[in-house]
Structure formats: C-alpha cells, structure tokens
Amino acid sequence: MDQSSAVLYTLLLCIPFSLSIFLLLRATSRRHRRLPPGNLGLPFIGETLQLISAYKTENPEPFIDDRVSKYGTVFTTHLFGEPTVFSADPDTNRFILQNEGRLFESSYPGSISNLLGRHSLLLMRGNLHKRMHSLTMSFANSAIIRDHLLVDVDRLVRLNMDAWTGRVILMEEAKKITFQLTVKQLMSFDPCEWTENLMKEYMLVIEGFFCIPLPIFSTTYRRAIQARRKVAEALSLVVVERRRGSERKKDMLAALMDEEGGGGGFSDEEIVDFMLALLVAGYETTSTIMTLAVKFLTETPRALAQLKEEHNGIRARKGETEALQWEDYKSMPFTQCVVNETLRVTNIISGVFRRAMTDVKIKDGYTIPKGWKVFASLRAVHMNHDYFKDARTFNPWRLQSSSETSSSMNMFTPFGGGPRRCPGAELARVELSVFLHRLVTQFSWEPAEQDKLVFFPTTRTQKRYPIIVQRL
Ligand code: HEM
C-alpha cells in the first residue's frame, strides 16, 4: 500500500467511527437537555383553550396555580400554536429579560407584526433597537415630562373632564385622554377634527390586536388592516408636511427627523411605523390602569379618603385652578402607592413573549431548546403570596410598610425589565397621577351599574366602567 492509499484508508475507517461518536454525543447531550416538566395538551391547540377560559373570568389565577403546584414555577405548556416554556419564577424572568438580544429575542405573531408595522420599536432588534429605545426614552424621561409634557397632561385631562356630566363611561374617557396625550407628545397636535377621525380609525386597528387574526374568517382583523393603512396614510402626510416646513417643534417627530436629537436618516415609512407603534404601546395600557384605579378606589373607601386628603392638600396650597407643577407631582406619595398597587393587581401586560435564540440552560438544570417560545409571566410573580403578603387583595398601603417595600420592589416589574423595559413608564405614572388628582378634587362619583373585571383578550371591565359623576 502506498502512502496516499494508507491515508485514504485510515480516513475511510475514521469517518464512520467519528460519525458514531458525534451521534452518540448528540444523543447524550439531548438526554441532558432536560425540558421543564409540563403538559403540551392537545395537538395544535395545546392548552390555549384552558388559558382563555381561565382569563375570561374574574379569577384567572387557577391556570397558573394548578401548573405551578404540579410542576414548579417553570413549566412547559403549548399556547397559541407553539410549545412554550412558561416562567412564573422571578429569577428566571429577570434572566430572560436581561438576556434580550443575547439568548432571547422578542417574538410576536405575524398577525400582530402586520398591524404594528415592521419598523416598530417592539419588533426592532440589535443596534437599531438600542438606538431607538434610547431615543424614545429621551422623549419620555423625567426632565422632558417636567419641562414640557406635564403642562399638556394637566391641560388635556382638565379639558376632557370639563365636559363630564351625569353618566360617564370611564374607560372611553380615559382612552380619549391618553390618545390625545400621545398625539400631542408625538406631533404637537391639540385635539381637533383631524385627531378625532384618526382616533376612530385607530380604534379599529386596536380591535385587530384582540381578535382571531385570520383574514378569511375575521372581519374585525380585515377591518383593522384597512384602518391601519388609513392611519399610516394620515401620519405619512404629517411627516411629509413637517419635512417641507421650516418650523422647529419640540416633539417626538422632530427628534426622529433630527440628527442631533438622535434621529435622522429614517424613511417616512420607518417614522410612521415607529409612531403608530408608540400610539399602540401607550394608549390601551395607561387608560385601562386609569379606569381600574378608580374601580379599586371606589371599592376601598379608606384608600379613596386618603387619596382625596393628599390631593385636597395640594389644591389648598395652590388655589382651585392653578396648573400642576413637577413639585406637586413629587408630593403625591400615597398616589404612587395607589398607582403601583393597581399596576400590580391588574397586570395589564401580564407577561412578555420571547424566543430562545439558542439552547438556553436555566435553573434546576432545565434547558429551553433553541427556537422555543418563552413566556415570562409578570402576573404570576405579582400574584404570588410568597412575594406579596395576601397578594390577591388590593392594598395600596403594602408598599408603605418598610418590611415589604425593598424585597417586594425587586419582584415588582409591571413595566418589564432589561433592554426592552417600558420607555413610557414615568410618563404613564405622571398621566395616572394627574388624572387621579383632577378626578378626586373635582368630582364625586358612584358606579352606574355592576361591572366586573375580565382578563381576556386584555385586562378590562366588561362594561367599560360606567359611573355617575357629580361636580364638587
Ligand atoms: C400603565 C402603562 C404602561 C404599562 C403597564 C407598560 C408596560 C410595558 C411593558 C411590560 C413593556 C415591555 C414589553 C416587552 O418586554 O416585550 C413595555 C414596552 C414598551 N412600552 Fe410601555 N407600558 C405602559 C405605558 C407606556 C407609555 C405611556 C408609552 C409611551 C411612550 C409606552 C411605550 C412603550 C414602548 C415603545 C415599548 C417597547 C419597548 C421596546 O421594545 O424596546 N408604554 N411597556
């Protein structure tokens, strides 16, 4: 045998040997790749129907409680067409949120992406996401709110409340307020016929997020896609006009177009998608929390009395009509307790979906396989008696007691965490505080009829919380 034949012969012998070693190792590593325990339910539907029927009631907790008691705080399930690792564990949630872009990436179904637009912040990844997230932050941070936005928040809340008499559907009113505020923050428009029409179309878009997203079956979804086109067209015109004009405004749109403000270089389509997604992110969330805070206060008269005392104190210092200042907002400690507790109990964003970018080892030696969906449940932690005493009761005083404050605040993540933490968190708090201030200092109210909380397709009250108001 010559030398080259010997090499070839050795190689031929080695390849099958190496291949079997490789397959053996892979099989061994598969065996070591332990999935969290759980149940994948029925083919395709998985456990989606159980989740939906639990969340359609006033008490969705059993869905999570049952599985946590059977399998532990991290379990496997199958939701909305995909196998999913569900985390009800605060450390695992933190790990998932902090590792955004490295081990996990945000993941929304195609139907949602179509409505959001592919250039929305919620769908961006990598460096572009970092840049746009910080640009959004720079337009909703404390200094901007203090120097620019607070005055509009106060003015628009008052403007809307001035028209209230008799029966008011609180959720509708709150939505109007948050929509107008977002439009003002984005492009400096005050409420007018144009904003009214935009809101009508926009509400159709929102409905599309909460329906069965199959264009063939769902007229709601088809209508939402059409309405999205109209909203995008209307916003495009604003962008075109702004590019033509010479006036320099101090709003989000200006920042998106301005190199110095961190923006610049974006196409009209990118700017429109970005603005549309911001409208989506800030509108439904804040208006629901406004409504539910009022519901909880109505049902907890001692909390309402303490809140009134705090705000009447501020009014007594300022006179009846004077606008709120940043110092006033900063002197509302009990209001912050009410806001936090409402966020905790209602969990308007009950958790966040991610997708594993690689096999990811998590606690207890479990592995989330590459490509799997992950749901980090913020709700499960907020509702856990181990972290919040008597967790399922609205108790705004809990965060005042020092024993509960520091440990619980670590577990309290209504705005998410990591690189995708909500950039509108402070703005939402300010909107909620000003809304409560004007409400309790100008009105008394009572529920117009019985209404109850449900959690699917979103957290809301069934009848949008109608109340009868009386001006003080
Ligand atoms: C009570 C009100 C609000 C709550 C509870 C809330 C909650 C959240 C949560 C949990 C996330 C993280 C989503 C994830 O990690 O995938 C988020 C993201 C976001 N929020 Fe909010 N939010 C509120 C109000 C607002 C407001 C007023 C704005 C307007 C500026 C806003 C803009 C956004 C944006 C743009 C994102 C996406 C961030 C990113 O993906 O980088 N939110 N919000």
Image (cartoon, helix red, strand yellow):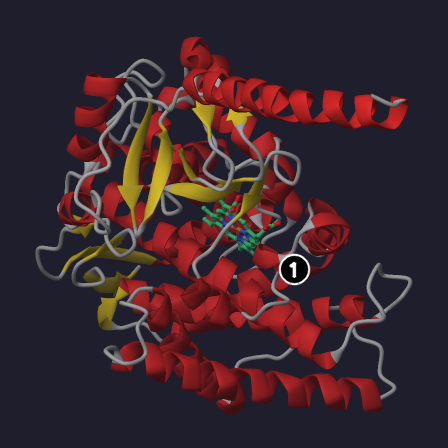
Q: Residue at x 20, y 42 (%)?
A: 47
| Residue behind mark 1 | 149
Q: Observer-nearest residue: 110 or 131?
A: 110
- Compare residues 105 and 385 and report the one nearer the observer: 105
Q: Is residue 299 left or right of residue 411?
A: left
Nearest the eye: 226 or 108: 108
What residue appears at the point 57 percent right and 34 percent down from the top-left corner? 358
Q: Quadrant of residue 139?
A: bottom right
Rendered location of residue 34, percent (x, y):
40, 19
Residue 45 visible in the picture:
yes
**Rendered view: 51 above or below 76:** below
Q: Is residue 257 left or right of residue 139?
A: right
Residue that lies at the very extreme toward the front in this rendered image: 1
Foreground pick, 71 / 188: 71
Question: Which x, y percent locates residue 444?
Answer: 26, 55
Q: What residue type is labelled 1?
A: Leu
Q: What element carries label 1?
A: helix
Q: Where the C terminus falls, by quadrant? A: bottom left
